[in-house]
Image (cartoon, rainbow, N blue to C red):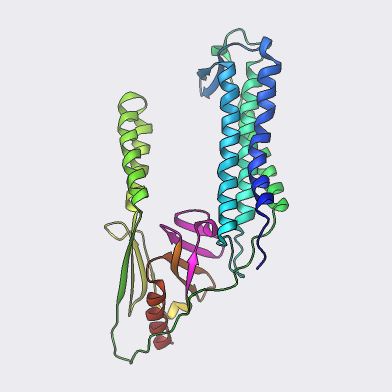
Amino acid sequence: MTTPNTIRLGLLAGLPPLLFALPNIVLLNAAADRLPDPIATHFGTDGADGFTGRVPTMFISAGLGLGLGLLFALVLVLGARSGKLVRPDESAHDPIRFMVATAWGVGAFLGVLMFAGTVANLDAADARQVGLPVLAFVAAAAIGLLLAAVGWLTAPRTPVSAGTPYRVRPLPLSPTERVSWSRRVSSPWMVLAGIVMLAMGVVTGFVAQPWAGVLLALTSLLLIQLALVRVVVDQRGLTVGTGPFGWPRWQLAPTEITEVAAEDLSPVQYGGYGIRMIPGSTAVLLRGGPGIVVTRRSGRRFAVSVDDAETGAGVLAGIVDRAA
């Protein structure tokens, strides 16, 4: 397994968002005498509905580009240095290319949109009369997708995993023997994020927009629901349920499973935390570290992060062998 060059990865993911913000910063400075102050910076269906000073807008553009660049660069560099930025040989998902493509695409989309907003303000006597055409959003999305594709092709491929670091020994079982293994996994930070978002939703609902408050509240409840996972291995196979009610739930029968492994899982491999669906795999990840990974007859993999994964995988492998 070849370790990617971390400096190259950091530059590939970190520079583009900042570079895409530069045209707007240059325009704000060069065309200062042609811009109202404050300028229109937010647009609704009826035109401009948000305004910001020209100089603060320059700092916001720079901060957004720099912040996004640092975020993407840190994720890739830390993942590469930890050795967890890998992919299974049969997986079509490529974490490095995905992250670089996302950095380029999101950076380009926001950069074009901010630039278009500033262009719309040029020579305007009153910023309240400024409008941003729908075509600007379409162009930003198209350019973002194009640059995302360029980023994907420019980035190096993610190294293939050398294999599982855990040795799974199938538990010997008699034809009538019943066995069960279960563990709970929780994510305190997801619960905290859900509580904070719920409070924000209540405040937003009363002070600003009720629909925005409801949306934040529903998102917070979803976060809290996903912050608890229960993993059960028994004669029914592998069952994974989320939240106090065990829903959504995945149940994989022994006859559906062709291979069982215990691996070190990294959120970077699957595009983040939570319920992740990528080409060839489904994962339930509340944290990085040990997890149970099974391969189904369809060839699709299912992974769940859980403590004592080696024992759970051994019990499941024994049940699968007995059902074969």
Residue at point 65% right, 31% down?
Answer: 21
Number of marks present in the image shown:
0
Looking at the image, residue 251 lies above or below residue 272:
below
Q: Nearer the viewer, residue 301 or 45?
A: 301
Residue at point 67% right, 34% down?
Answer: 20
Q: Nearer the viewer, residue 162 or 246?
A: 162
Q: Kindly tell me whether residue 141 is visible in this rendering.
A: no
- Residue 196, x across and y down, in percent: 33, 39
Q: What segment carries the magenta color?
A: 262-288
The quadrant in which residue 92 appears is bottom right
- Residue 293, x across and y down, in percent: 47, 71
- Residue 264, x across and y down, in percent: 49, 67
Figure quadrant of the N terminus: bottom right
Indicate whether residue 230 is drawn in magenta. Answer: no
From the viewer's perspective, is 250 left or right of 25? left
The quadrant in which residue 228 appears is bottom left
Indicate whether residue 278 is drawn in magenta. Answer: yes
From the viewer's perspective, is 242 left or right of 162? left
From the viewer's perspective, is 293 left or right of 248? right
From the viewer's perspective, is 76 left or right of 219? right
| Residue farthest toward the bottom in the current orientation of the protein | 174
Q: Kindly tell me whether residue 319 is visible in this rendering.
A: yes
Residue at point 59% right, 16% down?
Answer: 54
Residue at point 68% right, 9% down?
Answer: 33
Q: Nearer the viewer, residue 264 or 151?
A: 264
